Amino acid sequence: MHGCKLVMISILSLLAGAVNAATPCDKTVCWQVAPTVCLVNQQQRPCHLAVSLQWQSALPQSVCIYLDEQQLDCWRAANQGQWQQQLQIAGPAKLELRNQQQQVLLQQQLTVLSRQPERRRRLVAPWSVF
């Protein structure tokens, strides 16, 4: 049980560090997405995640946000944008920022973790003749 707590503390520390680490934008288009990991109590349960993102571009662009091929929001001829929404995901999902030509400018994987590890099936019967 102590190992589980240590893993949970490590995951939460990583998440907090990722949210607090604001990196300067040295690319044409940059974004910050938080959180990127969702924690559920049991395997195979949908996860409710309040995602917020901010993007910025050196030049005005028309871009849209997609979650696994579903368009969520768009901006026209903008240098920056903000977006926040409650998402429900059942497993790993991909968040993308695309231009008008559907080229992926930025991509972020959203991950679902479970507090209960996946149960392993016994390889040997629980009884024995010997």
Image (tube, rainbow, N blue to C red):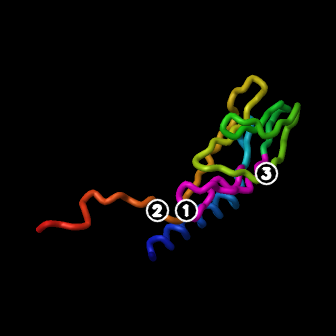
Q: Which residue is mark 3?
A: 85
Residue that lies at the very extreme toward the top in this rendered image: 101
Residue lying at 62% horizontally and 49% vertically, measured from the top left: 110
Q: Earlier in the sequence, mark 3 or mark 1?
A: 1
In the image, residue 119 lies at what x, y percent? 42, 61
Tag 1–tag 2 contact (CB < 8 Å): no
Stretch of the chain drawn in magenta = 33-54
- Quadrant of the frame with the N terminus: bottom left
Question: Element under label 2?
Answer: loop
Label 3 residue SS: strand
- Residue reaching furthest to the bottom: 2
Q: Horizontal placement of 40 versus 119: left or right?
A: right
The label shown at residue 117 is 2
Q: Residues within 10 Å of mark 1 (few under 14, many from 20)?
A: some
Amino acid type assigned to the residue bearing label 2 in the image:
Pro
Q: Position of residue 62 (x, y in %)?
A: 83, 30
First of labels 1, 2 by sequence position = 1
Tell me if 46 is positioned left or right of 73 in this view.
left
